[in-house]
Each structure stands twice: as C-alpha cells, then as structure tokens.
Amino acid sequence: MHPLELSAAVVDAIDHIPQGLAVFDAGLRLVSANKSYVTLLGLPEELSRRGCPLFDMALFLAERGDLGPGDTTELAAARLNQLTAKSTSLSQRRGDAGQTFEFYSSRLPDGGLVVSFADVTSRVRAERELERVNQNLEGRVQERTAALRRVNSELEIARAKADAANHDKTRFLAAASHDLLQPLNAARLYTSTLIERAKSTAFAELANSIEASLTAVEDIMSALLDISRIDSGALKPAPAPVLVQELLKKIEVEYAPLAREKQISLRLVASRSTVLVDRTLVGRIVQNLVSNAIKYTPEGGKVLVGVRRRGARLRLDVIDTGIGFNRDQHRLVFAEFSRLERGARMAQGLGLGLSIVQRLVAALGLALELDSREGVGSRFSLFLPLVRQARLQQRPIVPPTEATFGVAGLKVLCVDNERAILEAMEGLLGHWECDVRTALSLKQIDRERLLEGWYPDLVLMDYHLDQTSGLDAIEWLRHNLGGHLPAALVTADRSPAVRALAEDRGIAVVTKPVKPAALRATISGLASQSRRPAMRRV
C-alpha cells in the first residue's frame, strides 16, 4: 500500500464533507480526491483518476478560463507554483460558474501535497456587502461629523454673539439703572421735603399720594432691573463668610421705619452664626421677604426674623401674621405679575418681589421653604450653608433710627453730578436742620474753596461722577481732611462689585431712589463715627 494511499473507510468519510480535498505524492501526481473536489472543480473523469499530474489539472482549468486571460501553459505553471512554492498557502480564485473558491495547500514531509478548498461565495458576498455598508456608514459618519462641526461652529458664533449681546445688555442696564433712577431720586427727595413741610396742611394728602405713586414706580423699575440682571447672567455670586447679625441689622435699619409707620411689630432675633453666602444677593432675598411680610401684614400685626440651626445649614425664617394663603396658591405667589386678590386689595405692586426671590435662590443654589395659612400668616425659610469655627470681625453697621445721635446741626457735604438732586437733597437736609454744602465735582470744591473754615461731619457722595468715581472722590477728601471722615455712597448702581468696594473702604451705601427714613438712619449712624482731627488745607 502506498504511504499516501488512503483506506476505503477514510475515503468514504471524506467523500461526505462539503469541502474539496485531494492528496498528491512527491511527484505532484494525484493519490486520492473526494467527490467534492472533482464536482466543485468540474474535472472530467480522466483528470480525477489516480496518478493524474497536478499540472494537467491546472492546464485544464486554464484552458477553460478559470485562471483568467493569458497563455494557458504559463497560467497553469503559475498556479502550480502558487500552490507548492511555500510550505502552506492560502488563495482565492473564481470558478467556472462565477463562484469564489478558497484554496488551502500544505506540503507533506515526504514532498507530497494536500490541497483543500471550499466554495466561499456566500461569505465573500457577505464580506463585500459589509464592506460596502461600512464604506457607506463611514461616508455618513464623515458627513455627520462635518455637519456637526458646522453646527458647532455656528453655535460657537451664536454663543459669542449672545455673550456680546449679554455684555451689551449688562452695560445698558447699568446705564439705564443710573439714568432712569436719577430723576426719580430727585423727585423722591423733593416729595419728601414737601411731605414734611405740608404736615397739618391741606396739601398733606396730595403730597402723600405723590410719594405713594413714586414709590410704586421705583418698586417696578427696581424689580424689572433685578430680573433683567438675573436673566442676563449679570449677577455673579461671590460667596464669602458673612455674620448673620450684619444681615439682620441691615434689615432693621431699612425696614424698622416702615414697620413703625404701619404700626407693625418688627422683631429680629440676634444670632452669632456665620454663613457662606453672597452678602449682597442674599441680603436682597431677605429684604424682599421682609418687605413682603410688612406689606401684607395688617396694622397691629407682627413680623419676626430669626434663624435656627438645621444640621450643616442655617434656616433663616421670616414669619408674619399677615393675610396668608392656602396651599393651592403656593405656586401662584412666585409667578411674575401674579397677585392674590386679597393682597392686591391690600397693597400696590406688580407681584414681582417673590419672583425675584425665586430667581435669586435658584442662581445661588439655595433652598427656600414656604408654609402659609390663609388668614393666619406665612413663614418663608431660606436655608444657608453654615461656616464652622469662623471668627470674623463684625463690620460697623449703621444703627437704626432709635440711635441717640440726631441729625440737627450736622455739617453735611453732598456731591452729585445732577444739580436737581443736589437741590432736592439740600432742601430735605435743610429741613432736618443740617448745615449743608453741595458740589457737582471735586473741582468745584477746590475752585470755590467750599471747605475753607468749614469741616464736614460726613459726606454723601454720588458714585457716577463726571471725571472720577465717588469712591475715589471720598478717598481724596479723606486724604485732605482726615482719614476718619465718615462717608456714604449714594448711588443707583446696585451691583455687588460696587457695594463690596465700598464696604472694604468702610463706606456706607445708600441706593437711589433714596428713602428719607433710610437716609436719616444712615446719617445718624455716620454721625456717631464722626471725629474732628486738625484741619488740613484742601
């Protein structure tokens, strides 16, 4: 038996496999081939007999055209070399019916050769289809990527335009808040003087009506400007450790006169806690809550402001015995231009205060809790992050109007670039029996020698002067008159940055339009700080 000759059992077994299989001896003559080998190649009977040279088979296939165009002898020799040149080889070629065959050949130790192949037409077709799909997919991905880049570029341009628009809007709002509130401030000062002079006369009711109308205009403008600042992103929170007592004392200074006027008991519970917040923005929230509480609490009612520890947070409560509202109306009270019917009958307004509160709370990442019962009262609770083991030096706070320091006889220097405001301020302070001198600028003070022989107890300075800022003007006066000169910045600019700069220099801030009660309380507080060092030449 030839070494490569297969047993009948093996031959029978390999005849049942779908792949073609053939064995050749060292002379590359056929030893054995299964039925699939002969059938798939379409070999005639004489080429499937034992001993048939592999070259003859290759020549037959070349003559049939299976090996492509060209000289058939050269094609057959090339095919034979492809199968035998290496110890193993893997190749593909087309069949006579358009199939794709994949051949695997392997040289045997004695020089013989084993050739196997399979019809891989379906697999190749699937691979080509997958390749086509991948190419299409890659093309679509490239198209989508290009489109996404275009969209991102357009978005970047749009964002840049939006940022520029917001910046312009912010600048416009700053200018608008100053230009719109300046004449309103003058009108409020004139009206305050008129109210005080018209007491017990037939004009008293008229003067009070004018004051109420101006207050309504001021509230609307301030609310709209605040909403615009928040929505445009102009308000940038700057958290820092703040003594709660400072916030409470400021509320007492600003709202104690209003509460007394309405015969409402305003009580603020002292606290030594320190919180990590934006002083100005949180102060604005508390101001709006207290203002709302006083506005909607009937005469003889009570408003309480205090704090409670709640874990790592401090809960600041504003509690009133006002008209209250039921649970179904909770969402309504925070909506813009929305007011409950009973509240609308009780007080004027547009219903913007709590909308501003909600916006500020969201911008600062804080939490606000509401509990109210109709006819009983309301509790608004603001949760603030506590600062543990903080030791802060309490800033000097202007005392409330109950302070023992009066305003009569005080020498007050007023500087503002609006002549109408100076005239109105002079009229109001003069009615309070203050000794007032006014100037449009530092140059006028120097040119007219306004301070020769006259040393002011305090200075009320506008922020937006024509040639310098009010803060720098105060520093100039302090340098020339003495570093202890008490001063207040009177400004329509409500930005946190301006307030922070003023507080860092120990300068009080009074916002325009000026409320006479708050102004008087500020002047009284500044008078307590007044010291009279030796006069220096200006």
Image: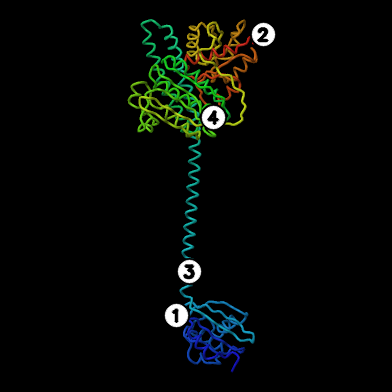
Q: Distance between the residues labelled 4 and 3?
A: 65 Å
What distance separates the C-alpha of mark 3 from that of mark 2?
99 Å
- Disc nearer the start of the sequence (1/3): 1
- Marks 2 and 1, how far apart at CA: 118 Å
- Which residue, given by chain and number where applicable, does mark 2 sit on? 534
Residue 534 falls in image quadrant: top right
Q: Which of marks 2 and 4 is nearer the N terminus?
A: 4
Q: Which label lies toward us, 4 or 3?
A: 4
Disc 2 residue type?
Ala
Mark nearest the camera among 2 and 4 is 4
Front tag of 2 and 1? 2
**Viewer-proximal residue among 75 and 227:** 227
Question: Could you say whether the residue bearing mark 4 is in a helix, strand or loop?
Answer: loop
Q: Is residue 373 above or below residue 513?
A: below
Disc 3 marks which residue? 128
Q: In which quarter of the image is residue 222?
A: top left
Number of residues whose C-alpha sits closer than 10 Å to that of mark 3, classed few (under 14), some (14–19) or many (20 or more): few
The amino acid on which the numbered mark 4 sits, given as a three-letter code, is: Asp
Q: Mark 1 points at which residue?
A: 97
Residue on which disc 4 sits: 278
Quarter of the rendering containing residue 470: top right
